[in-house]
Image: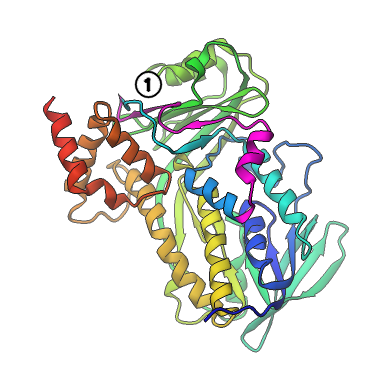
């Protein structure tokens, strides 16, 4: 039975992508939604201080684009109008899997060369235009107000130093990896979740270059995926503003340099040479920026036997992925869709246990995809199942066969874009194709 009744006031902690999308989801069920963001928003489309990863290459997977177009009708067309390049994820993009170049084909999966500042600004403009949503910058949520086992509001400190108590029926923590959710739960005597971590020690560097004719041969981009024995990755993608974005990444102690000669040397031994060509030929428009990402983390809120009523956690505060797989923004879209659906079905009744249980099911697929890729590396610590060796052996053959059979490449990209489950790669038809390609 669907609930059409509206609740009162919802507060969202954090005005980045996950928080803004949560506000969009809440706007259909709450009279008022307020997003508090401790950072200030820039006047122009540039990376902001509160999102240190904002200058790094981000990916909007096909599933994320579909979801954004549902939450904000016309969003994909608006990206094109804003100058965001796009193309087919297989025909217009080069992929190197385990050193093998994927066979080209038209996949029907649309890829976008959109920067993080651009997409965040577009989402923020649309959320801010909703009549019952207010986005407040320069305001930090310092704590929760709790009454009789439920959230009653939030303690907010403005950039001027002024403090206030804001009443709310629901608080959603979207503060990312800086979330204080666990400390708040402990403060009020609530259990905190166990977590699973897979440590890969990723270091990645991004730099932007002026687009030059001839580079990439007109393609949207290229990706060289790391694999055991070669823990280096490289991505080149066209972005709005006539720029190339180049990302270099290293796992397990491989650290990309930030100087010109060092960056070229870092990628010179990789299977694809697009990144090296851009680094040698194109004119840089900014300095290289380095980031470190020690581990992927999944907080198991769904396993708690007692929840603080009216308190949810989303985005990186709930689950953060190895950024090499580009899943973060898309998963935030999916969580927003889930939250909106749960509220429309049964309102705020028992929302926390319902949301965390459903979110765990939602996260299982992208988590498996990311950590499965990481656990291919024997140096990465983590739990491996008894069948993993057999499955990984088959997937090794699959990646090699995708260089011969374009249908295998399309199937792989559907999974990578969260448009199909990982298990789809184990279908009898695809297994037969892998065998045939291996016999050639």
In which quadrant of the rendered image does the C terminus lie? top left
Residue 3, by quadrant, is: bottom right
Residue 195 visible in the snapshot: no
Number of marks in the rendered image = 1
Residue 305, by quadrant, is: bottom left
Q: Which residue is mark 1?
A: 270
Location of residue 149 with respect to 51 vertically, above or below = below
Considering depth in this image, is 23 or 260 the residue closer to the camera?
A: 23
Residue 11, x across and y down, in percent: 71, 68
Location of residue 180 with respect to 425 vertically, above or below = below
Mark 1 neighbour density, 10 Å: few (under 14) some (14–19) many (20 or more)? many
Q: Is 104 contained in the magenta span?
A: no
Considering depth in this image, is 255 or 358 the residue closer to the camera?
A: 358
Residue 87 visible in the snapshot: yes
Location of residue 224 with respect to 137 vertically, above or below = above
- Region rendered in magenta: 71-100
Residue 420, x across and y down, in percent: 36, 50
Residue 204, x across and y down, in percent: 51, 34
Judged from the image, the secondary structure of the residue bearing numbered disc 1 is loop
In the image, is 82 to the left or to the right of 293?
right
Residue at the outermost left position: 439
Question: Which residue appears at 54% of the width and 72% of the height?
Answer: 342
Considering depth in this image, is 113 or 269 the residue closer to the camera?
A: 113
Residue 249, x across and y down, in percent: 47, 32
Identify the image's colour scheme: rainbow, by chain, secondary structure or one colour.
rainbow
Q: Is 96 contained in the magenta span?
A: yes
Residue 239, by quadrant, is: top right
Question: Which residue appears at 67% of the width and 39% of the height?
Answer: 118
């Amino acid at each position: 039975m669907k609930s059409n009744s509206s609740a009162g006031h919802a507060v969202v902690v954090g005005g980045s992508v996950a928080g803004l999308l949560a506000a969009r989801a809440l706007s259909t069920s709450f009279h008022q939604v307020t997003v508090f963001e401790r950072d200030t928003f820039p006047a122009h489309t540039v990376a902001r201080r509160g999102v240190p990863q904002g200058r790094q290459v981000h990916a909007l997977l096909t599933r994320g684009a579909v979801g954004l177009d549902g939450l904000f009708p016309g969003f994909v067309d608006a990206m094109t109008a804003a100058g965001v390049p796009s193309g087919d994820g297989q025909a217009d993009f080069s992929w190197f899997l385990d050193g093998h170049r994927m066979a080209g084909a038209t996949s029907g999966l649309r890829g976008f060369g959109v920067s993080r500042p651009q997409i965040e600004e577009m989402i923020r403009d649309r959320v801010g235009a909703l009549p019952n949503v207010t986005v407040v910058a320069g305001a930090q949520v310092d704590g929760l107000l709790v009454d009789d086992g439920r959230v009653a509001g939030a303690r907010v400190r403005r950039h001027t130093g002024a403090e206030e108590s804001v009443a709310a029926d629901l608080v959603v923590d979207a503060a990312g990896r800086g979330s204080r959710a666990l400390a708040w739960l402990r403060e009020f005597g609530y259990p905190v979740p166990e977590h699973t971590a897979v440590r890969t020690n990723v270091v990645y560097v991004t730099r932007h270059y002026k687009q030059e004719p001839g580079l990439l041969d007109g393609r949207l981009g290229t990706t060289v995926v790391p694999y055991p024995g070669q823990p280096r990755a490289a991505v080149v993608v066209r972005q709005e503003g006539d720029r190339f974005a180049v990302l270099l990444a290293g796992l397990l102690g491989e650290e990309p340099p930030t100087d010109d000669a060092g960056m070229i040397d870092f990628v010179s031994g990789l299977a694809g040479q697009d990144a090296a060509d851009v680094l040698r030929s194109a004119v840089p428009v900014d300095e290289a920026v380095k980031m470190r990402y020690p581990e992927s983390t999944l907080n198991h809120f769904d396993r708690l036997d007692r929840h603080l009523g009216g308190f949810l956690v989303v985005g990186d505060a709930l689950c953060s992925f190895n950024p090499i797989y580009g899943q973060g923004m898309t998963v935030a879209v999916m969580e927003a869709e889930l939250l909106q659906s749960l509220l429309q079905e049964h309102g705020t009744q028992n929302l926390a246990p319902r949301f965390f249980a459903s979110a765990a099911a939602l996260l299982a697929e992208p988590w498996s995809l990311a950590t499965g890729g990481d656990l291919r590396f024997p140096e990465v610590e983590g739990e491996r199942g008894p069948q993993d060796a057999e499955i990984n052996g088959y997937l090794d053959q699959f990646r090699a066969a995708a260089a011969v059979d374009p249908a295998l490449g399309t199937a792989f990209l559907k999974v990578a874009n969260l448009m199909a489950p990982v298990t789809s790669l184990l279908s009898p038809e695809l297994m037969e194709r892998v065998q045939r390609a291996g016999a050639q």
